[in-house]
């Protein structure tokens, strides 16, 4: 899949106000600073479509991007940001969990996991929560600037092993680096196939 146009649509805090269009959407979630906004920019081939920052907690709202008038990428604020107050965390929880549970257009969550660090409890817990709520997701390992690096390989394997403690089957996992151009074709290939499937089913009409 080649993205011809990627445009910022708008930002929302309330899932009920999100766009009414029926385009399928792919939401990017993960800990603050894991590289969600960078990955969206990388996939779209655009440097500054979504705002990137060295300081965690940059993305604060549900941000929509229109991809070729065919699908949406949704950039979400990260979780696990220690400097947030309890009140802010509640707000985050409400906003994100409401969005994930209620948004009918949501096709897949792209769960980002930092490949440079050991498995994190916050990620494993969030994945378990999605599993319990039947939210479809794939895992995108980020910041694998040198994907063959021994630490990266070990971290990814450890993460998969940790998942296998609760899951019988591993979800799809793709290794990426926005900085070093790793994984774009594979991620876009997955998104393309899921999108085609969505439109095929939509054309066939509702199952009676
Ligand atoms: P929040 O919006 O705060 O939740 O963060 P985010 O997940 O959107 O992360 P963002 O894309 O803003 O990137 C955070 C930091 O990680 C920035 O300093 C990026 O330059 C850096 N970063 C992102 N992707 C990569 C990558 O592939 N490799 C390396 N080395 N750094 C990266
Ligand atoms: Mg961000």
Image: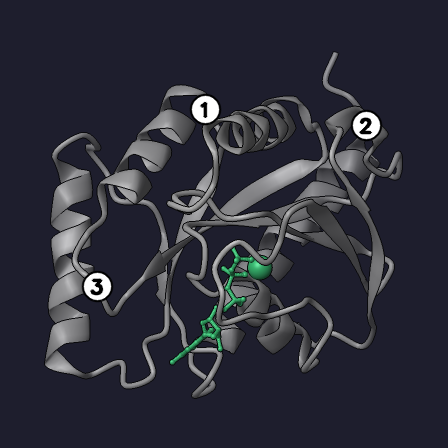
The response on whether ligand 1 sits within 8 Å of label 1 is no
> How far apart in space, not on screen, are marks 1 and 3 (Cα)?
27 Å
Seen at 41% across and 50% down, the residue is: 31
Q: Is residue 155 left or right of residue 84?
A: left
Which residue corresponds to mark 2? 205
* 166 shown above or below 48: above
Q: Residues within 10 Å of mark 3 (few under 14, many from 20)?
A: some
On the image, the x and y values in percent for residue 132 come to 37, 20
> How far apart in space, not on screen, are marks 3 and 2 (Cα)?
45 Å
> How far apart in space, not on screen, are marks 2 and 1 (Cα)?
23 Å
Which residue corresponds to mark 1? 134
Q: Quadrant of the C terminus?
A: top right
Seen at 51% across and 66% down, the residue is: 187
Counting residues from the N terminus, which is met first, the one under dot 1 or under dot 3?
3
On the image, the x and y values in percent for residue 103 come to 69, 28
In the foreground, 132 or 116: 116
Seen at 47% across and 85% down, the residue is: 181
Q: Is residue 207 left or right of residue 166?
A: right
Which residue corresponds to mark 3? 117
On the image, the x and y values in percent for residue 38 come to 56, 71
Task: Identify the disc placed on residue 14.
Answer: none
* Residue mark closest to the camera, 2 vs 1: 1
Under circle 1, the secondary element is loop
Q: Is residue 48 left or right of residue 176?
A: right
The type of colouring in the image is one colour
Q: Are marks 1 and 3 in contact (CB under 8 Å)?
A: no
* Residue mark closest to the camera, 3 vs 2: 3
* 175 shown above or below 191: below
Seen at 57% across and 47% down, the residue is: 77
């Amino acid at each position: 899949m080649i993205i011809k146009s990627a445009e910022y649509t708008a930002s929302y805090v309330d899932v009920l106000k999100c766009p009414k269009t029926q385009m399928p959407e792919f939401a990017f979630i993960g800990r603050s600073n894991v590289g969600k906004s960078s990955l969206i920019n990388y996939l779209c081939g655009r440097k500054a479509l979504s705002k990137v920052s060295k300081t965690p907690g940059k993305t604060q709202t549900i941000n929509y991007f229109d991809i070729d008038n065919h699908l949406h990428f949704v950039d979400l604020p990260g979780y696990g940001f220690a400097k947030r107050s309890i009140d802010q965390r509640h707000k985050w929880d409400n906003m994100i969990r409401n969005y994930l549970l209620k948004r009918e257009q949501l096709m897949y969550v792209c769960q980002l996991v930092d490949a440079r660090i050991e498995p994190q409890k916050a990620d494993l817990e969030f994945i378990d929560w999605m599993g319990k709520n039947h939210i479809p997701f794939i895992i995108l390992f980020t910041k694998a600037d040198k994907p063959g690096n021994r630490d990266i390989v070990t971290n990814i394997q450890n993460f998969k092993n940790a998942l296998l403690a609760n899951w019988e089957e591993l979800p799809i996992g793709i290794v990426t680096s926005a900085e070093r151009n790793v994984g774009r074709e594979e991620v876009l290939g997955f998104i393309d196939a899921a999108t085609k499937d969505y439109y095929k089913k939509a054309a066939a009409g509702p199952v009676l």
